[in-house]
Amino acid sequence: MFNSNWTPSRQPILVLLMGMLFSFSAAADEPFIIGVGTHLLNKSSSLTNLMKLVADAGITSVRDDAYWSTAEPRRGQLHIDSAWTRYLNEATAHRLSPLMILGYGNPFYDDNAKPRTAQIRSAFANYTKFVSHRLGDSVGFYEIWNEWDAESPGDAAMSNDYSALVTETAQQIRSENKHVKILVGAITSKGIDLGFANRLIEADVLSKVDGLSLHPSVYCRNVERHTPERWIAWLRDVDASLRSIANKPVPLYLTEMGWPSNAGNCGVDEKTQAAYLARSFFLGRTLPDIKGMWWYDLVNEGTDQNEIKQNFGLLRQNLEPKPAYHTLKAISPTLRDFHYEAEKSRETDDNYLLRFSNGAEQILVAWSTAEDQTTHVEASSIQQGNVQLIDTGEPEKGQFDSGTPWKCNDNRCSAEVEITEFPKIISLGTRPPLFAQ
């Protein structure tokens, strides 16, 4: 009950309490997930070196296919393949949370048909129940099927059948593991545009699971739409639409996202791939409903520089890191540990100046989509010496002295910093204490 004798002198107490509440709330938020697709679960080779490379890059989750046909190699006889056990053990050893895709057909059930009939759905649900029981707490996420919408994204019957599958399958997973997160959808860009995600929400699938997974790739869209900045503008519209249909926030998990570094159609060079990776991850952090993003893919699938599917990796086929790997390693601490501050950020047609904080520590992530140019930066407190920053175009340098001096007067410090297509993570110092003048 409020005291009618409230006086202005008590306002700082309220400010302090509100600040503490905000801090506790921020601390309770789950960290943003930095993931990668691996295509390693079903291979028998040693994974130690690869998993170490994944962990060293600051990645926190690995995504792979737990094929139904592998778990049920004979009708009615279910087992866990030894390669799966090795993969999960390595992931655990490197503190990585696996996302397992439950999906694809089985030759014993209508010749690998999708589980659209009651009989095949029941068999599929039995497989998911077995897998979730046997794998237990070694798995952090299950994703029900992969790109179900791909063959007919505008077909309402396809989304209805998928909703029925989710209802039956999610119940089986929950009966075996109450703590694992269940994701549904894995919806392609075309499916997003043609309403597949909308229809799932209208069917109330979100009441049964933890989030909607999207594959919002734009690498083959026209020039005006395939950049990270156009990508996030589209996703913001998608998010607003989904929120409106659900009448509440919709947790989004981008379980496949990337740009191929092939020389042919739809590709970019390796340097641009690295710049797009950094920009898309940072832009993803500006949309609160996005809970994580899994880069597609870890390793190039081949050596043909003209083939799209062979050039998505963070690593070349010989496991040599591409620029995108080093860039992700440089930005992962910021993605994981810092919170986006929308009210202090600014976006224009060409310049993106995004503010993040970690407690009192303040940073600015800045880049330009046009020509290299200079931007005005203001520090959070009095600074001495030169601006300290990380240049994601030169990630191997780590944080370094830019040589650009802070200029201070009237208790304010500012600097003119050159920005390029590669985001720069600029240290702004620490926010002043609550009651500082």
Image (cartoon, helix red, strand yellow):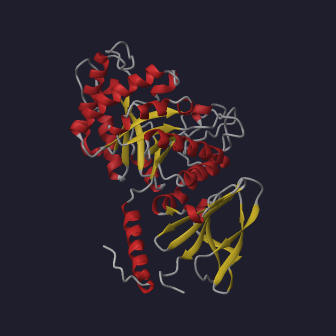
Quadrant assignment, res 415:
bottom right
The foreground one among 366 and 235 is 235
Q: How many marks?
A: 0
On the image, the x and y values in percent for residue 387 come to: 65, 75
- In this rendering, the answer to whether 345 lies above or below 130 is below
Q: Residue at x 55, y 59 (%)?
A: 330
The foreground one among 59 and 43 is 59
Q: Residue at x 44, y 25 (%)?
A: 159
Side (left or right) of 300 relative to 47: right
Quadrant showing the N terminus: bottom left
On the image, the x and y values in percent for residue 373 come to: 76, 62
On the image, the x and y values in percent for residue 127 come to: 27, 27
- In this rendering, the answer to whether 76 lies above or below 402 is above
Is residue 353 something that shows in the picture?
Answer: no
Is residue 271 something that shows in the picture?
Answer: yes
- In this rendering, the answer to whether 179 lies above or below 338 is above
- In this rendering, the answer to whether 234 lies above or below 191 is below
Quadrant assignment, res 230:
top right
Side (left or right) of 40 relative to 379: left
Quadrant showing the C terminus: bottom right
Q: Residue at x 58, y 43 (%)?
A: 237
Side (left or right) of 283 relative to 20: right
Side (left or right) of 133 relative to 300: left
On the image, the x and y values in percent for residue 75 come to: 26, 17
